[in-house]
Image (tube, rainbow, N blue to C red):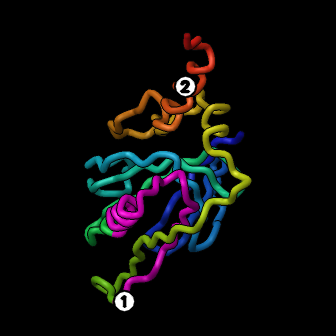
Amino acid sequence: MKQIQYRFNRANGKIFQCQRANLQEIGESLDTIILHATEPIYGDPFEQNRSQEWVQLCFLDTHLNWCYAMLNSGNSGALNNWYFYQQKLEKAHQNLWEVTTKISLIQTSSSYNDNTWYYYDFENKPLSPDINIPKILKNNRHLPLVDTSLNLNFTIPDHHPLLSLNNIDERAKFVCWQ
């Protein structure tokens, strides 16, 4: 399984896949299965960006590669749609890894100082029944849920919560009830 980084460029509305030292344009939307999302952290991991809030996502892309990307708040509260999306799933009693999330960059209706900006849009679709998230997590537990190469102090989980449930099931096989 490949590890891949994606970049959401809200200045031009494009999503890029990082390949070695090159960026390959993907388009304006990306289908993902989000495995983990960090809490927002305030900081400046990139020299070209000012300090702001960042959320890091670990997800599977359409080729089931293990991927990372960052969402940023900017001046416009761009993370608000992310928070609303999380609340929507919580109200529906769904976890991020139980749906396919389409992440899009949508142009704002107004511009600031004649600059055009894009905001995040999130849409959930049913997860394909062919995709077994517990099995993928179990087979790739050596892969981190947080990209530690970035200069931000994200909390790094020991394991995915879904693996805790699977471990209980595995241990139950060896219990003798008498």
Q: Is residue 70 above or below residue 123?
A: above
Give the residue pinned by disc 1: 109
Q: To which quarter of the image does residue 172 belong? A: top right
Mark nearest the camera among 1 and 2 is 2
**Type of the residue with mark 1:** Ser
Q: To which quarter of the image does residue 125 belong? A: bottom right
**Type of the residue with mark 2:** Asn
Mark found first going from the N terminus, 1 or 2: 1
Residue in the image at 59% along x and 30% along y: 141
Q: To which quarter of the image does residue 118 belong? A: bottom left
Q: List x then y, in percent, for residue 108.
A: 38, 83
- Secondary structure beneath label 2: helix
- Secondary structure beneath label 1: loop
Q: Is residue 127 above or below residue 28?
A: above
Residue in the image at 66% along x and 61% along y: 24
Residue in the image at 61% along x and 39% along y: 134
Q: List x then y, in percent, for residue 102.
A: 55, 67
The magenta segment: 81-109
For the residues marked 1 and 2, what is the alpha-carbon distance in whole angstroms? 48 Å
Give the residue pinned by disc 2: 167
Q: In this view, does 92 lie above or below 40?
A: below
- Look at the image and tell me in which quarter the N terminus lies: top right
- Magenta run includes residue 88: yes
Label 1 with label 2: CB-CB less than 8 Å: no
